[in-house]
Image: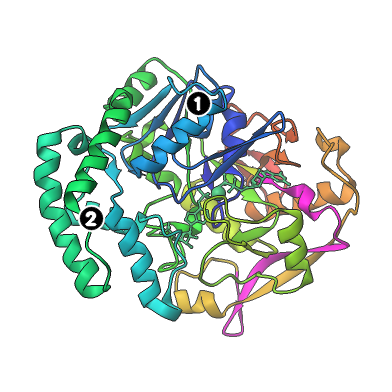
């Protein structure tokens, strides 16, 4: 299950929903930049690193190898869940995941400041620098954290090196390496019972024919390789990234579910063709409570963009969609959908990977009538106002994939299951008129 837009699509809610029939839920990329919200019986849970399946005590939750772990934040998250009465005995942490260190956070924040108008608008959680060290092969992994002697040696060298960057490049105070090592050794003892060979654990679950859900963080357009570079995150949130990050082969994955909002949001910098800098944009932000779960920043809001939707279908091989936050559109008189872009006077139906074309493109809109009735109590497609149903049909036709789930509110029960998202039909085959004629 992956985000089909720029993150915050409602993946937490959909993961929680799908976890009902999952034996194992795996986070395979990202770190504490993610903020996944789950609302159950009026109680709100905000998860950053722990898979959103954790609310089910019998579902095994794995923080996979491709993630980056800030142990301090993870420990806080574990403590908060325990305080709310949630058991975390079903949590497992990959021994090969990389560790976010204090210098990563400092360098992330300082580098953003020094970029000025070229800043990315990161979450400031040290994600980019942690993945950069992983690629540079100077990273600290969970395994290193579990070996005090080794950690001393490795961190002694690394902190001296990072201190030069902090002091000389950013004019910041140096870190006290002994203090950092002492703190991280404490974190290691707290986390030790959770550490496993995650790829092996997942492999055994595959052999036992268990249902495994890979919970994406961020979204397709924040993908390091296929997103709106450089305004992206430093991991691969697309479906293919789940294989790399979890350590499973592509043949393991039966089905790919994309989560998209009924409109679009983006938090951070970077181009956003359908952005609404007007009262409707503000209305969507207010009604949708569009504030970042991790940083509290106001999210930018705009119309649904089907060019991006089709790109997400292509890049992830989506079988079906979960459309969230339909209720946020309830009051609108009319609703626009971007069906194509105008680039240099030409109509373009495909996402332009050329960043400057994307920055300059003009959305081509189709306007649909709104329904101006509440949908939050709808529990089946037949409960929906006909304009809302038409809006969903239009989206599915544009993206050429069926909609399996429609979400009409943050709670678990505010959901319409259109077709079984796990065992339902594979990707639809449509004829030239957009009529479903079979499946691939
Ligand atoms: P994630 O990062 O993809 O898990 O999404 P976030 O949790 O960051 O943001 C989604 C927000 O929308 C959260 O506050 C959810 O509780 C909320 N939400 C999810 N689905 C719906 C929905 O259908 N309607 C409304 N109104 N809110 C929703
Ligand atoms: P979830 O999992 C939305 C954005 C940041 C910034 C860019 C790079 O909740 O959907 P980073 O800190 O990763 O280096 O920031 O990516 N970003 C997200 N936006 N949802 C997220 O996660 C995000 N994680 C990172 O705002 O633009
Ligand atoms: Mg989020």
Q: Which residues are magenta?
A: 323-348
* Front position among marks 1 and 2: 1
Helix, strand or loop status at disc 2: helix
Mark 1 or 2, nearer chain start: 1
- For mark 1, does the 10 Å Cα neighbourhood hold few (<14), some (14 to 19), or many (20 or more) residues? few
Residue 389 spot, x, y in % from top left? 82, 46
Element under label 1?
helix
Where residue 93 sits, quadrant-wise, is top left
What count of labels does the image hold? Answer: 2
Visible residue check, residue 71:
yes
Q: What residue is at 56 percent from the left and 34 percent from the top?
A: 15
Compared across the picture, whether 354 is left or right of 156 comes to right
Q: Is residue 313 left or right of residue 323?
A: left
Which of these two is toward me, 395 or 333? 333
Task: Give neighbour class at mark 2: few <14, some 14-19, many 20+ (Cα, 10 Å).
Answer: some
Which labelled disc corresponds to residue 82? 1
Q: Residue at x 57, y 50 (%)?
A: 293
Residue 313, x across and y down, in percent: 54, 51
Q: Which mark identifies residue 305?
A: none
Q: Would you name the residue on which mark 2 appears?
A: 133
Does the CB distance between marks 1 and 2 fall below 8 Å? Answer: no
User: Is residue 207 shown in magenta?
Assistant: no
Between 191 and 20, the one lying in front of the other is 191
């Amino acid at each position: 299950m992956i985000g089909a837009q720029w993150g915050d699509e409602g993946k937490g809610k959909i993961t929680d929903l799908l976890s009902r029939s999952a034996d194992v839920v795996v986070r395979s990329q990202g770190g504490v930049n993610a903020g996944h919200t789950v609302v159950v019986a009026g109680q709100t849970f905000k998860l950053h690193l722990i898979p959103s399946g954790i609310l089910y005590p019998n579902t095994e939750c794995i923080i996979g190898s491709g993630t980056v772990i800030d142990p301090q934040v993870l420990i806080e998250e574990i403590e908060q869940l325990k305080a709310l009465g949630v058991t975390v005995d079903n949590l497992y942490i990959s021994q090969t995941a990389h560790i976010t260190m204090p210098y990563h956070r400092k360098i992330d924040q300082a580098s953003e400041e020094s970029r000025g108008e070229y800043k990315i608008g990161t979450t400031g959680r040290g994600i980019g620098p942690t993945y950069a060290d992983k690629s540079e092969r100077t990273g600290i992994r969970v395994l290193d954290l579990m070996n005090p002697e080794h950690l001393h040696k490795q961190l002694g060298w690394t902190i001296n090196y990072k201190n030069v960057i902090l002091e000389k490049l950013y004019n910041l105070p140096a870190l006290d390496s002994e203090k950092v090592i002492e703190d991280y050794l404490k974190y290691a003892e707290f986390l030790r019972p959770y550490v496993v060979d995650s790829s092996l654990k997942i492999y055994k679950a595959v052999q036992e024919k268990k249902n495994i859900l890979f919970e994406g963080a961020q979204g397709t357009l924040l993908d390091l390789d296929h997103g709106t570079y450089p305004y992206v995150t430093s991991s691969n949130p697309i479906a293919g990234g789940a294989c790399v990050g979890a350590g499973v082969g592509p043949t393991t994955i039966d089905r790919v579910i994309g989560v998209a909002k009924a409109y679009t949001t983006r938090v951070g910098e970077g181009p956003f063709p359908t952005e609404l800098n007007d009262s409707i944009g503000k209305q969507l932000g207010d009604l949708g409570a569009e504030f970042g779960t991790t940083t509290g920043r106001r999210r930018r809001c705009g119309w649904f963009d089907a060019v991006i939707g089709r790109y997400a279908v292509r890049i992830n091989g989506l079988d079906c969609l979960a459309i969230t936050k339909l209720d946020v559109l309830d009051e609108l008189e009319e609703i626009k959908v971007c069906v194509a872009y105008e680039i240099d006077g030409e109509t373009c139906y495909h996402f332009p990977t050329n960043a400057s074309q994307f920055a300059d493109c003009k959305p081509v809109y189709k306007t649909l009538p709104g329904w101006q009735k509440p949908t939050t109590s709808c529990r089946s497609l037949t409960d929906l106002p006909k304009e809302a149903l038409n809006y969903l049909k239009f989206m599915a036709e544009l993206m050429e994939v069926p909609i399996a789930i429609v979400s009409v509110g943050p709670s678990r029960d505010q959901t319409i299951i259109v077709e079984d998202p796990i065992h339902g039909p594979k990707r639809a085959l449509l004829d030239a008129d957009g009529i479903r004629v079979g499946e691939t």
